Image (cartoon, rainbow, N blue to C red):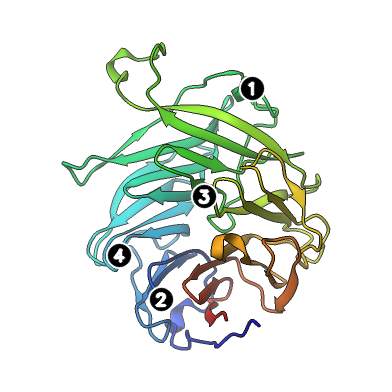
Amino acid sequence: MFRGSLLLCLYLPLSVYAQSFRGMCVTGINSAWVSGSKGTVLRTSDGGLHWDTLNPEGYERKDFRDIHAWSRKHAVIMSAGDTSVLLETRDGGKSWKLIYSDSMAGSFFDAIDVRRNQILLVGDHTRASNPYLVLLARNKKSVLFRNHFFRKQSTLWKMGNLNESGKDSFTFFAASGSNVQWMDRNRFMCIPVTPDSSYCLSGSFTRRHGLKYPDPSIKAEKYLFLDDFTRIPFPSQKAGGAYGFAMYSRKNGTAVGGSFYTPDSGSATCFITQNGGKTWLPSTTMPHGYRSGICGRQKGKIQVCTGPNGTDISRDFGHTWSQWLKEGYNTCAMKGKYLWLAGGKGKVKRMRIR
C-alpha cells in the first residue's frame, strides 16, 4: 500500500510562489535543494518546514533548471537559456562563483549529472556539426574546474541524423534535469532527440592507446567515445519525445516523455529497457499523460513519474502505471522512504511512501 503524509513545505518564502521549479537535489531524508525561474535557489534541512533563500546575486533573470548538492554547503546550479551559466557555492549559498558559461548564440544548457567531483553537462548544439557535451573534472589540488570539449569519433557520430550539415542535429529537453546520467567512473548515458526521433546514447571517457589526438598538447586528457545508441520509440510529434529517464542498474531503466503541447495524451509516454538501453519496450499500462520527471527506489521496483496533469506510480519496474496524484509537477526525487516533487507556482512537496 502506498500512502503519503504531506505537505511539508507550508513555509515557502512568499516571494517564490510565482516561480517554476525544475531543479531538485535531495541530500538526506530531511534535506533538499530546489532551483528555478527568476534566479531562485532554496534549501531546507527540516523536511520542508522552513526554507532558506539562497539566490545568487546578479543572476535574478536566470532560470536555474538543474542543481546538484554534495552537502548543506557545497552545490552547483545550472541555468538554461541565453548565456547559460554553471555556478558553484561552497559556503551554503552565501556566495556563488561562476565556473562555466557560454554566451554563443544558440547555446542552451539542458541538464547536468555529477559523480563525485565530475560534472557532465548536456545541451543544445552551438555549432552545426556538434551537439553540446562538456565534462568538468575537479583538479584535486585546486578549487577550480577544468572543461574539455571532445572531438568526433567513430561512425556512431554520424548515425541518427547527426550529420555534418547540422540538419536535425541532436538536442535535449530542459524539463527536469533527468536526461543524462553517470553509469560508473567513465561511462554515461543520455537521451537526445531530433525532430522525429528519440535516442538512448551510451558513451565513455577514456585514454585509448593509439588514438591520434587533434592537439598533442592535451594528449593526456580524456576524450569522448560514443559506444552505442538506439532509438526509443516515442512517436513523432511537436515538442515530443524523451524528456527524462532513470537507470536503476546497468541493465534496467525507464524513459518517460510525450509532448508538452498535449499533456493529457497518455499514448506511448513510457518505455523500459532491460538490457542497458539496447532495446526499449512500451509499458503495458501507460502513465496518464506527458511526463517530464521520473525517479525510483528498490532498483526500480517502485517508480514515480510526474508531469503537468498529474503524478503516476508503478509497483512493477515501470510495466504498469496508475494515477497517484492529480497534482502535476516538473521533477521528482526519492530518498529513503520519502518522495519529493517540485513544479510550477512555487510548488514543492514531500511525501512518505510505504
Disc on the earlier residue, 1 or 2: 2
- Report, in whole angstroms, how far the alpha carbon at label 3 lies from the one at label 1: 27 Å
Q: Residues within 10 Å of mark 2 (few under 14, many from 20)?
A: some
Q: Is residue 297 visible to us here?
A: no
Of the two numbered discs 3 and 1 on the same chain, state the one appearing first in sequence.
Answer: 3
Amino acid marked by disc 3: Gly
The residue indicated by pointer 4 is 71
What SS does tag 2 mark? loop
Q: CA distance from mark 3 to mark 2?
A: 32 Å
- Is 67 left or right of 352, judged from the image as shown? left
Residue at image location 54% in from the left, 42% down from the top: 189
Residue under numbered circle 2: 29
Is mark 1 in CB contact (under 8 Å) with mark 2? Answer: no
Q: Nearer the viewer, mark 2 or mark 4?
A: 2
Left or right for 146, reference 110: left
Q: Earlier in the sequence, mark 1 or mark 4?
A: 4
Q: Tell me if residue 70 comes above or below residue 98 in the rendering.
A: below
Task: Measure the alpha-carbon separation of dots 1 and 4.
Answer: 40 Å
Residue 255's place in the image compared with 31, above or below, is above
- Is residue 214 shown above or below 125? above
Label number found at residue 81: 3
Foreground tag (3 vs 1): 1
The image shows residue 129 at horizontal and vertical percentages of: 58, 24
Q: Are marks 3 and 2 in contact (CB under 8 Å)?
A: no
Placement of the N terminus among the 4 image quadrants: bottom right
> Dot 4, how many residues are within 10 Å of its Cα: few (below 14), some (14-19), or many (20+)?
some
Type of the residue with mark 2: Ile
Mark 1 belongs to which amino acid? Lys
Q: Label 4 near label 2: C-beta < 8 Å? A: no
Residue 120 falls in image quadrant: top left
Residue position for label 1:
158
